[in-house]
Image (tube, rainbow, N blue to C red):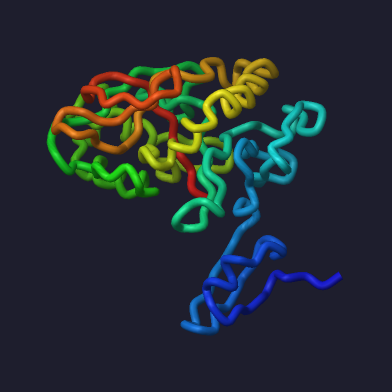
Amino acid sequence: MSKNYLTSFNTLAEYQAATNLDLPNVSLIKADGSIKYKNVFAGAVLGDILMWDSTNQKLVKTVGAEWSTEIYPLSQYEPIAINVYPAGQTSDGKARFMALKWASNTSDTGSTSNVGLVWGNDGDNLTSKDKTLFNGRENTDKALALADGTTANTKAAFAAFAAVNRFRTNGTNAGDWYVPSYKELSLYQANYADINAKITAIKNASSSIVNTVNYNQWSSTESNTSSTAWRLSSYGSWDSISRGTNAVRGMLSL
């Protein structure tokens, strides 16, 4: 059987329409000479679980969002995050995985339960107000550039952003994660019950991985005043809320 790891297309539109690529894949776009790359996580579907395979020392994902301890025993596969935006639906062609653990200002490896963290300083355009962009990474970098560099749970420290920036897991490092934008959380919000049911299944298997399934959580997107930001509530609705204390989960782009 032929393999499509190395391919070429006349146009970008042809490449984007291709559905039979073996992953990972490297493709040449002849029209402009650009090279496109898709890794194995590009095939992740909504609800797929990202895991650390301790035997093979690498990150892997479930197939078709089917997770169970029978298929993926916890002795080998540690659940890390859940896919909340498939690569085919993002502007940069990368999948978005939301951490299962909550960020914490007292533990770089996060917490199984929600930790209240301050969003950051008041002010306009510290990050972005645009709710249509996959720009959580950019928002986080902007906030960190304004932060005082401490681990304090204060506005000056931009505590939510700082805690996510320090977050790390097996297979990922500090700096890999960021506070998701409104857009990057929007598909989670639209499928709130289904995704939380998958997180609950992991909780039921081991509360040492995740204990609090859902809670009020920050996005990195500013709201319509200089003192508010958007949060996804524990009820699965959006709130424009003052930049005080809420929980936050990191996002990983793969």
Q: Is residue 156 left or right of residue 75?
A: left
Q: Is residue 167 left or right of residue 77?
A: left
Q: Which residue is farthest right?
A: 1
Residue at horizontal 66 percent and vertical 76 percent from the top: 7
Residue at horizontal 40 percent and vertical 44 percent from the top: 175
Residue 71 spot, x, y in % from top left: 80, 33
Q: Quadrant of residue 11?
A: bottom right
Q: The N terminus is located in which quarter?
A: bottom right
Q: Is residue 71 left or right of residue 24?
A: right
Vertical relation: 4 (above or below) 231: below
Residue 172 spot, x, y in % from top left: 52, 43
Q: Quadrant of residue 226?
A: top left
Residue 27 spot, x, y in % from top left: 60, 73
Residue 28 spot, x, y in % from top left: 57, 78
Vertical relation: 34 (above or below) 235: below
- Residue nearer the viewer, 232 or 33: 232
Residue at horizontal 53 percent and vertical 19 percent from the top: 213
How many marks are shown on the rendered structure?
0
Q: Quadrant of residue 56?
A: top right
- Residue nearer the viewer, 14 or 110: 14
Vertical relation: 138 (above or below) 186: below
